[in-house]
Amino acid sequence: MKDLKYLAAFSIPIIAFVGLFFKGYWVWSTPIFAFVCIPILELIFPVDTDNLEHKEVESKLKRKVFDWLLYLNLPIVFGLVTFALFQITRHNLETYELIGFIFSVGIVLGVNGINVAHELGHRQTTKERFIGKALLLPSFYMHFYIEHNFGHHLHAATPEDPATARYNQSVYSFWFTSTIRQYLSAWKIQKKLLKNNNQKFLSTKNDMLWYTVFQIIYLASTLVVFGETGLIFVCFSGIVGFVLLETVNYIEHYGLLRLKTKSGRYERVREMHSWNSNHVIGRIVLYELTRHSDHHYKSSKKYQVLDCHEESPQMPFGYPTSMVLAMVPPLWFGIMNKRVPKEMILS
């Protein structure tokens, strides 16, 4: 039964569906659940720092249920987007309802879309990577697959990494710098990959071109079938989805930097270069994303067997709570700056 605890990750899309179905003020139930109820639960439930024994790890890696819990997010995410589009076009919604629809679906795109895509993007099978890339489509962040796997994991916790927030940088500034720099970085990496494989820019191997085509088709299809209102909805819900991702990126490495060795190169990525959280609610809802230090230590490691490392800097709260705190920069700086190792703070 413990294996089924990750079913709780479906609580957000379920609540979103209820809100979209009943409409009215119900449309705001998802933001309230995600950023009020879950943070309160994180404060109530204890922190769990236990790691699995070797036999438990082997057992969990053999159970396909953990993989299927990820795969199920594909029909859930696209089903919810489609349901929302039909609701919008068939009913005369008030402005506050439409905005509620955007935030509700956007949160699902971030949590059950991009977050799951991140996990599957590190898998070795073509099927799993395909599902991961498909889950990035509604948030217009398919380039994340390239930049994250070939860029972020190489440059994490360095000034060269777009997804590492600088010390004293606000989350609002980070949204712009990270979004723009990651997209440009993805193109730069793509061009390098093409060159290494003796492929031209206009090639079937240019994934960035394919991602652009797929996203244009997605938008054009929405416009044709659901009209301008539908197009506006998918655009803004997609923005909410990737802004949530960037908020998570912000808290994952905030202020942490790898030091340079005598040779002038950066030290290797270690457990101390990512913020870790063992708050159980955030861990379950985000498929163990909060044990981010171990993920960077070995990116191919599946979510259900990620460990907690004593060397990792620990967040005082879970990721959902920390995302809320990040929205108030003075409060965030007051809590987090003193936790950043002094040797990592650039003068």
Image: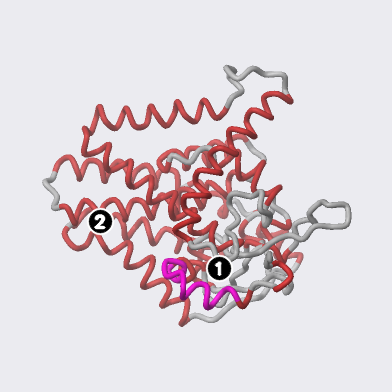
The mark closer to the camera, 2 or 1, is 2
Secondary element at image label 1: helix
Specify the amino acid type for callout 1: Lys
User: Is the stretch drawn in magenta largely helix, strand or loop?
Assistant: helix
Q: Position of residue 280 (x, y in %)?
A: 53, 72
Between the residue at mark 2 and the residue at mark 1, the CA separation in whole angstroms equals: 34 Å
Residue assigned mark 2: 100
Magenta residues, start to end: 324-337
Q: Residue at left 22%, top 34%?
A: 228
Residue 89 is marked as: none
Residue at 72% of width from left, 23% of height from top?
197
Residue 215 placed where, x, y %? 42, 32
Q: How far from the left and from the top, in percent, is residue 169?
A: 53, 62
Q: Is residue 123 visible?
A: no
Q: Seen in the image, is 141 located left or right of residue 60?
A: left
> x and y percent of residue 87 in the render?
20, 45
Residue 2 tag number: 1
Q: Amino acid at mark 2?
A: Gly
